[in-house]
Amino acid sequence: MIDFIKAQKMFKEYLKKYNLEDGSIKLKIKHTYEVVKKSEYISKELELDEENIELAKLIALLHDIGRFEQVKQINDFSDSKSFDHADYGVEVLFNDNLIREFIEDSKYDIIIKKAIYNHNKYQIEEGLNEVELLHSKIIRDADKLDNFRVKEKENFENIFPGKYNPETINYEIVSPKVYKDFMNYQCIKLEDRKTQIDFWVCVIAFIFDLNFYISLQYIKDKNYIDILVDRIEYKNEETKEKMKQIRQCAKEYLERGK
C-alpha cells in the first residue's frame, strides 16, 4: 500500500537538513511538487489504475531527492561522473534504506529504483520489464514538462546556480554540434553543451524525447517553444538566426506529433 500523505510528510522532514532559503533549493522543491502533479496527470490520461497512479506520484516525489545534496555540495545542476543526482538519489534511498521512511512495502522497490535511475539518463536502459519501462517513461515526461515551466518562471540566477552571467548570455552562440543535433530531432548530450545558450537549446530539445502524445500536446498547448525561445534577447546575429530555425523545427515537430 502506498500512503502518499505520509511520504509527503517524510519528504518535508528530509528537506530540513538543507538551506530552505536558498533559491536553487526552493526551485527544486517547487519542481518536485509540480512533477508530482504532472505524473498524476499523465497517469490519469493513460487511464492507469489507482495503484499505478499513486506509484507514479511517489516516484515523482522522490525522483530529484539527490538534487538537494548536489546543490549543497557543488552548487550546480549539471550532472557529471563525480555527481549524478539520479545515481545519488538511488544510493541514498536504497543503499541507506531511506526508502522505508517513505513506503513500508518493498514490493515496488525495483520499479522506483529503475524509474529514478533512468529519469535523467540520455536514454532509458535496456532490459526493463513492462511496468518498469512505463514508470520510467512517465517520470521522464513529467520531469521534462515541468522543466519548461521552470525555464519560463524562474530567475536565471536559480536556473544557472553559480554560472549565470547576465553580461554574456545575450551574446553567446549555439555550438555547431548542439545546433546540428537539434535540427536532426536529437536530444543534446550534457558533454556537448558549451554555453548557456546550449543549455537553453538542450531544454527545448526535450520534446524529442517525450514518450506520450499527451506530453507533446501539453507543450504545444502551453506555447512553451515560443516562450523559451523569446525569453533571451539574442545579440549575436548568427545565434538569432539559429534560434529562428530552432523555433521552426520544434514547432513542426510538435505539429506532426509522435
Image: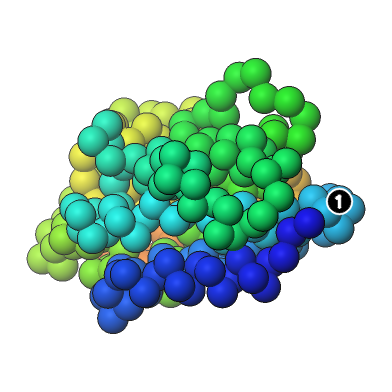
Query: Exactly how many numbered labels are in the figure?
Result: 1
Where residue 86 sits: x, y (%)? 43, 43
Residue in the image at 44% along x and 56% along y: 65
Query: 258 and 159: which one is in front?
Result: 159
Q: Quadrant of the N terminus?
A: bottom right
- Image vertical order of residue 173 relative to residue 126, above or below: below
Q: Residue furthest bottom?
A: 21
Image point (43%, 67%), residue name: 14
- Indicate the secondary structure of the residue bearing disc 1: loop
In this rendering, would 128 be left or right of 147? right
> Is residue 2 toward the left or the right of residue 153 in the image?
right
- Where residue 7 appears, as percent x and y from the top left, is 61, 66
- In this rendered view, identify the residue nearer to me: 136 or 98: 98
Question: In this picture, is 26 found above or below 42?
Answer: below
Q: Position of residue 30 (x, y in %)?
A: 48, 72
Taking 42 as reference, is 49 left or right? right
In-front residue for pair 62/237: 62
- Amino acid carrying label 1: it is Leu
Where is residue 28? Give x, y as percent: 41, 65
Give the residue at x 27% y 74%: 19
To which quarter of the image does residue 221 belong? bottom right
Q: Which residue is mark 1?
A: 48
Question: Camera-side residue: 211 or 114?
Answer: 114
Quadrant where the image shows the C terminus: top right
Residue beneath the point at 10% across and 66% down: 167
The answer to whether residue 257 is visible is no
Q: Please say which color scheme the image uses.
A: rainbow
Q: In the visual, does 134 lie left or right of 6? A: right
Q: Report if residue 32 is visible in the image.
A: yes
Q: Is residue 102 above or below residue 19?
A: above
